[in-house]
Amino acid sequence: MSKPVVLTPENAAFVDDLVAAGRDASTDAAVLEGIRLVRLREARLVELRTAWAEGVESGHYEPVEDVLDARYGASETAGS
């Protein structure tokens, strides 16, 4: 199934530059690569959310701010 994609002038120029430089074979290939990367990011977010939920449910949960503060003195350097 084919779907038309409308790019902003800036994005169109970026894709044109990618194709001209040989980074992607065509505009379609560049858009497909972008979709592939979004899919990878979404899959990684699912993994991270699952790991976070498992950590919370394990009973060994500490807020990240507390962990960073204990390990790195984050609150002392925040805003410095």
Image: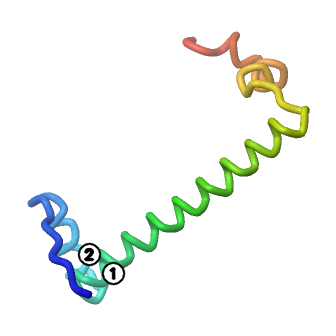
Helix, strand or loop under label 2: helix
> Is residue 11 rendered to the left or right of residue 43?
left
**Could you say where residue 57 lies in the image, as x and y percent from the top left?**
84, 38
Q: Which residue is mark 1?
A: 23
Q: Residue at x 13, y 67 (%)?
A: 6
The C terminus lies in which quarter of the figure? top right
- Neighbour tally class for label 1: few under 14, some 14-19, many 20 plus, Cα within 10 Å: few
Tell me, yes or no, whether the two marked residues, 1 and 2, touch with CB atoms within 8 Å: yes
Rendering colour mode: rainbow
The N terminus lies in which quarter of the figure? bottom left
Would you place residue 19 above or below residue 13 in this image? Answer: below
Q: Residue at x 30, y 77 (%)?
A: 30
The answer to which of 69 and 5 lies nearer the viewer is: 5
Q: Residue at x 20, y 79 (%)?
A: 3
> Is residue 42 rendered to the left or right of residue 71?
left
Residue ranking furthest to the right = 59
Quarter residue 27 falls in: bottom left
**Amino acid on which the number 1 mark rests in the picture:** Arg
Helix, strand or loop under label 1: loop
Residue 18, label in figure: 2
**Amino acid on which the number 2 mark rests in the picture:** Leu
> Is residue 45 rendered to the left or right of residue 4?
right
